[in-house]
Image (spheres, rainbow, N blue to C red):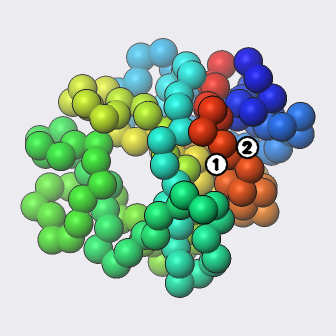
Amino acid sequence: MKSTDLVVTPTHLRFLNRTFARTIGWGGVTNRKAEGDGATPQGTHRIVGMLYRPDRLKKPSDWALPIRPGDLWSDDIRDPDYNLMVKKPHKYRAETLRRADPMYDVIILTDWNWPYAVKGRGSAIFMHQWRGPGRPTAGCVAVSRTDLLWIAARIRYETRLVIR
């Protein structure tokens, strides 16, 4: 592992020789991820994108893309666009990316089960803002807003999310 990797350990997140408090999925860490299990998948995941709310904050990185009204992420295994960003209206179940709360004001996208998703293996694993210390996610990795913005500004092409 390199200092440029985001490393999730049993107690914290490490990046660029700093440590950060973090939360993970309520299902713990697994090497057998399944849709809806609330688990965070073990492994080394590439960072493949970043999304942000332009109505709430400035662009956190020069390569971040805006989250627009109607942006969704498909998590329905029946959907031909399963585990991809889609737009409203959408006839399949999908997670709203432009939320009323600040949890998805910045989303760091990983390559978990992407771009060619295996249905049922679990949809997107994001890094995003937490609901609070110790409050688990649905499988993503989450940190405080301050830490997320610090991290987002420093991610590079070679950065990976490593979950042990």
The amino acid type of the residue labelled 2 equals: Arg
SS under mark 1: strand
Name the residue at 41% across, 24% down. Answer: 33
Above-or-below relation of 52 to 23? below
The residue beneath circle 1 is: 142
Name the residue at 30% across, 54% down. Answer: 85
User: Which mark is first along the chain, 1 or 2?
Assistant: 2
Q: Residue 158 carries which label?
A: none
Q: Report whether residue 77 is seen.
A: yes
Q: Residue 22 carries which label?
A: 2
Say which quadrant the C terminus sits in: top right
Q: Say few, some or many: other residues with alpha carbon within 10 Å of mark 2 (under 14 / 14 to 19 / 20 or more).
A: many
Residue 105 in percent (x, y) is at: 56, 68
Left or right: 40 as drawn, with respect to 136: left
Q: Say few, some or many: other residues with alpha carbon within 10 Å of mark 1 (under 14 / 14 to 19 / 20 or more).
A: many
Report the Cα–Cα distance between label 2 and label 1: 6 Å
Residue 22 in percent (x, y) is at: 73, 43
The amino acid type of the residue labelled 1 equals: Ala
Name the residue at 48% across, 77% down. Answer: 100
Q: Are marks 2 and 1 in contact (CB under 8 Å)?
A: yes
Residue 54 in percent (x, y) is at: 53, 78
Hey, which quadrant is residue 34 in on the image? top left
Hey, which quadrant is residue 82 in on the image? top left
Above-or-below relation of 150 to 102? above
Residue 64 in percent (x, y) is at: 53, 61
Query: Which residue is situated farthest in the bottom direction here?
Result: 55
Left or right: 128 as drawn, with respect to 76: right
